[in-house]
Amino acid sequence: MKNLIRFFALAALLAALPVAAQTYDWSSTGSTGIYDYPSMYKYTTTGPTVKFANFQSGTVLFRYPVTNTYGSSTSTIPGWTTLHSTFTDDGSNASVTTKLFRVDKCDYSETQLCSISSSDGANSPVCDTCNFNSTDIDFANYYYYVEVTLTRSTTSANAQIHGVAIN
């Protein structure tokens, strides 16, 4: 009888694993983004963070390809509604902007789904979000990417991206 109970418990656990695997969200650390070519010598990475290199100012642009971590071929519309961004912006001479884009697979037209803009804050990480419609993410018909723009007008300003996520 004990073996039968163990068998059913194991079977229930194994049956639940595919369902649990489909509930994970997408995320990426700041340092894993793909840089825009003009940004090549303006940035440096430290662990998960992208920031301006010493004595550099202007604009740094990174893109993060969004992949379907929800269910691949079985579920192409995950129901995600929130873009998250973790960044540092220490004052009026710096800014961080995070945007989520949808790209049509047929004509490659782009649509911005939401945007987060930093506000001048302390020299410590800030988490912020923006929302979009739960049907906007449809991996069967669209590609997605997150674009992060760091700007600073003086080399003493601090603009950093630590991570982006969608759920």
Image (cartoon, helix red, strand yellow):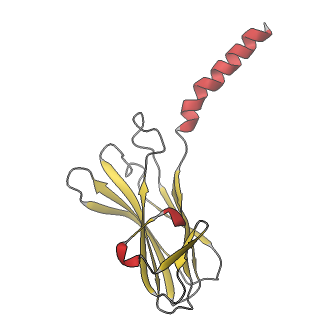
- Examine the image and state in which quarter residue 89 appears: bottom right
Seen in the picture, residue 160 relative to 152 is either above or below; the reply is above
Q: Is residue 118 at least partly visible in the picture?
A: no
Q: Is residue 62 at least partly visible in the picture?
A: yes
Q: Quadrant of the N terminus?
A: top right
Q: Residue furthest left?
A: 107
Nearer to me, 114 or 20:
20
User: In the image, is 108 to the left or to the right of 160?
Assistant: left
Q: Residue furthest right?
A: 2
Q: Residue furthest front?
A: 41
User: In the image, is 59 to the left or to the right of 163?
Assistant: left
Nearer to me, 59 or 95:
59
Residue 133, given in percent of the width and then of the height, sits at 41, 54
Residue under the image location 47 percent in, 54 percent down? 81
Residue 64, given in percent of the width and then of the height, sits at 44, 61
Seen in the picture, residue 66 relative to 6 is either above or below; the reply is below
- Examine the image and state in which quarter residue 7 appears: top right
Nearer to me, 10 or 62:
62
User: In the image, is 138 to the left or to the right of 153?
Assistant: left
Seen in the picture, residue 77 relative to 14 is either above or below; the reply is below
Residue under the image location 55 percent in, 45 percent down? 24
Nearer to me, 104 or 153:
153
Seen in the picture, residue 66 relative to 146 is either above or below; the reply is above
Residue 90, given in percent of the width and then of the height, sits at 59, 84
Report the label total: 0
Residue 37, given in percent of the width and then of the height, sits at 36, 73
Residue under the image location 50 percent in, 93 percent down? 154
Residue under the image location 65 percent in, 77 percent down? 124
